[in-house]
Amino acid sequence: MSITSLVREGRAATQPSAVRVEAERNDAGPAASGVEFVHTQAARPGESATAFFERLAAHLRREPATILALMIYGRTAAHAEATEAMRAALGETRWPVTWVEGASCEGAPLVGVQVFARRGGSPVERVVVGGHVLGTIYDDGAARHCLLGGLGPTAVAMDRPAQVQQMFATLDAALDLAGFTLSDVVRTWFFNDDILAWYDAFNRVRSAFYAPITFRTGTLPASTGVSGRNPAGAATAVAAWAVRPHGAGASVRDVPSPLQCPAPAYGSAFSRAVEIDSAGVRRLLVSGTASIEPGGKTVWQGDIAKQIGLTMDVVEAILRSRGMGFADVTRANAYCKRPEYLPYFRAWQQAHGATAMPALPIHCDICRDDLLFEIEVDARREG
């Protein structure tokens, strides 16, 4: 059974051998709630896919954990070789994988990988469709979480808006299989092929799809929407994070930006940031952020240094509003419209003492042609 049949059958999908949720033993430690983390590994100059994934496997052997999901950034032309290298190094792929091009600013086949993982805790469950793992479910004691990845439309010959509608149907069906609903979604990542040619159409479909949903965040999920090809040749690919609290011990809330207007004010259906407060940990998920002023217009057109400066000021203001700073960042993607813009971001990091921030630099178009840089960050604070 393929994901197509999952979408068509929805809640009626009943073939357990092809569509199922599997429990998986966790050998990474005895902690009751577990400790989740993200390991970021950037590709080294000239490093082969085999060497890259062998290095990743060696790190994971030193720090045993259960892999929840992978996000891999690199050329689609490198997908087959990298997938083979990943399987050789890590074994059977028992987690969702989102592959995005997302090209390297240095021209290498791979940019890097972000490993969402967890030490200890109760066994995870895998959402399996047609032999492919599309999602991972885990429980931190206060809430159930579901990470989905690599989802998209199933008929890539359709026009782009129709593919987006089908992608949302796929997402809805996968969430239902996992025991979640769209209202539980707190974070999305949309990677749209040739985004500048049709971002307005994408926004119209997304807004219409979201209109009847009351999200747990109180408004909308946090999100990123940038240009990115995928190995299936689809118009879009999506990854998502859903959360369902058990009770008063966990909560999810929208976090506004002190320096920008809400994104829906200019037609984009997402929140600036979302905070998950669960099991004694606050996780702040900051959406893709760029050089946009409080009225919603692009500022510092053509000036990459100033666009980066304003963007990072906006992100810092969101972090500070929740008692955090760049030292609390656990994952980041720095999207550069041109490869030559990366040194400006590195210079900003150096000037602000943020060189340790785990940011992958990715070459791609942003959702507006005059935006030269965008960054998304996740941050974490105990208590």
Image: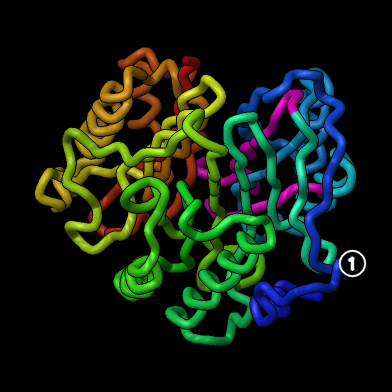
The location of residue 74, given as percent across then percent down, is 61, 50
State which quadrant residue 307 falls in.
top left
Q: Residue at x 44, y 35 (%)?
A: 251
* Closer to us: 321 or 63: 321
* Closer to us: 136 or 250: 250
- The N terminus, quarter of image: bottom right
Residue 103 lies in the magenta stretch: yes
Tell me the magenta residue range: 94-121
* Closer to us: 96 or 183: 183
Residue 306 lies in the magenta stretch: no
Element class at badge 1? loop
Q: Which residue is mark 1?
A: 17
Left/right placement of residue 149 relative to residue 332 reads right
Q: Is residue 186 visible?
A: yes
The location of residue 382, given as percent across then percent down, is 49, 16
The location of residue 248, given as percent across then percent down, is 47, 32
The residue sitting at the left extreme is: 295
Left/right placement of residue 162 relative to residue 140 reads left
The answer to whether 296 is drawn above or below residue 35 in the figure is below
Q: Residue at x 59, y 42 (%)?
A: 111
Q: What amino acid does circle 1 point to?
A: Ser
Q: Residue at x 12, y 44 (%)?
A: 294
The answer to whether 96 is drawn above or below residue 3 in the figure is above
Q: Residue at x 28, y 21 (%)?
A: 320
State which quadrant residue 132 falls in.
bottom right
Left/right placement of residue 73 relative to residue 56 reads left
* Closer to us: 256 or 40: 256
The location of residue 311, given as percent across then percent down, is 26, 36
Q: Is residue 223 visible?
A: no
